[in-house]
Amino acid sequence: MSLAQNRYSPLYFLASLGAGGLAVTFFMWLMFWVPHPDQPVPIFENNFAVLTTGSILQQAMVLGAMAGVAVFGFLNIKLLIWNLGRFSAFRAAASYSDFAASNAGSQVLALPLALAMTVNVGFLLGLTFVPGLWSIVEYLFPAAMAAFLMIGILAFRMIADFLKARFANGGFKCAANNSFAQVLPAFALSMIGVGLAAPAAMSNLQLTAGVSIILGTFFITAALLIAFVAAILGLRSIMENGLNVEAAPTLMVIIPLITVVSIAMMRISHGLHVHFDIHGGAGETFTFLTRMLSIEVLIALFGIMALASVGYLGRFINGTEASAGSYALVCPGVAMSVLGHFWINKGLVATGMIAKFDAAYWVLSALALGLQFGMIALVLILARKHFAKNSAAALAPAE
C-alpha cells in the first residue's frame, strides 16, 4: 500500500492540480510558438500546419508540446478520479467530524480547486487534439461557464460550512494558523474565476463575453478578499508562534494565485477591448505583468528563505518524512513558468523591447522552461514518495 492510500489527505487533490498545471506549461509552447492568426489560441489545425510544413525543430517542438499536454492531462484526470474515490471514503470515516472541526477543515477546498483545473485541462485537450472544435466553440463556452459556476457554488458552500461552524461554536485555533493554509479557499475561487473569464477573451458574442466578465470578476474579487484576510491572519500567527513546518509550502500558494488572477484580468481586459470599446495598450500590459511577476519573485524568495530555515526540503522532499502538503510546492514553479511566458511574449515582445525568437528571447524563455522541467522532476520525486507501493516514506511517522 502506498503512503497516499495509507494516510489520505484532501491535499492530495494538489497532485491532480500540479499535473494539470504542467499540461498548461506545455500548452504555452503552442500558445506562443505556433502561429494562430485566426483565433486567440492555437487549435489542432494550427499544430497540424506546423507538423506538415514546419522545420524539423518546429515539428519536434509541436510533438513535444502535444505529448506533454496529453501525458499530464491524462495524469490530471487520473489523479482527480482517484482522489474523488478516496475523499468519499475519507468523508465517511468516523474521524472526519474531528477533521472538519479543526483548522485543517478548509483543506476540502482542494476538491473544487482540482475540479476547476480539470475543466481547464479538458478545454486545452480539446483545442490541442480535436479537429474542427473551434467551429462549435461558441456553444461550448456557455457549457463551460455553467460547469465552472456549479464548481463555484460547491466552493462557496464549503467555505460557508467552514465559517458557520466557527461562527456558531468557535474552535478556530489562531496559534495553529501559523502558515498560509487558509489561503487555499482563495486559490480555489481564483481558479474558478479564471475559467469563467476565458470566454471574455475568446468569444465573438458580446453577451457571452459580458457574462464571462461579470462572473470572472466576481470570483476573482472574492478570491482576492479572502486571500488578503487569510494571509494577514497567517502571517500574524507565524510571527508569534513560528512557522508550521509541515505547512511551510503554503507560504508560496500566493504565487499561483497571482498567476491565475493575472491571466483572468488579461482575459477580462481583452474582452473589454473587443466588445466594450475599452482599450489598453501593450505598455499597460507590460507594466501590469511586470508588477505581478515582481510580486511572485518576492514571495518566492520569502518562501525559499522560510523553507530553508526549517530544513523542509531535507526532511520532506529528500528525507524520509512525508506530507501531502509537499504537492503545494509544484504550483508556484508551474505558475511562475506560465506567467514568465506571458511576460516575455505579451510584455517584452509586444512592446518591442526584444524581438521574438532572438537570443534574448530564448535566454529568458530558458528560465521559464527551467522552472517547468524542475517541476516535472519534483512531481516524479513526490510520486515515488507518495504513490509508490511499500515506499519507505509510508513508514515514516506523520508530523
Image: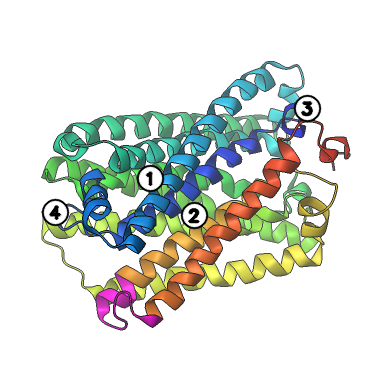
Q: Residue at x 42, y 34 (%)?
A: 152
Looking at the image, is mark 4 or mark 1 earlier in the sequence? 4
- Give yes or no for contact between labels 3 and 2 (Cβ–Cβ under 8 Å): no
Observer-side mark, 4 or 3, equals 4
Cβ atoms at labels 1 and 2 below 8 Å apart = no
- Residue 173 percent coordinates (x, y): 75, 43
**Amino acid at pointer 1:** Gly
Q: Which residue is mark 2?
A: 257
On the question of residue 239 being in view, the answer is yes
Frontmost of labels 4 and 1 is 4
Indicate which label's residue lies in the foreground, 3 or 1.
3
Mark found first going from the N terminus, 3 or 2: 3
Task: Kindly identify which residue carries mark 3.
Answer: 6
Residue stretch rendered in magenta on the structure: 346-359
Which of marks 1 and 3 precedes in the sequence? Answer: 3
The quadrant in which residue 252 appears is bottom right
Residue indicated by mark 1: 193
Which callout, 3 or 2, points to the residue nearer the camera?
A: 3
Q: CA distance from mark 4 to mark 3?
A: 50 Å
- Magenta stretch containing residue 91, yes or no? no
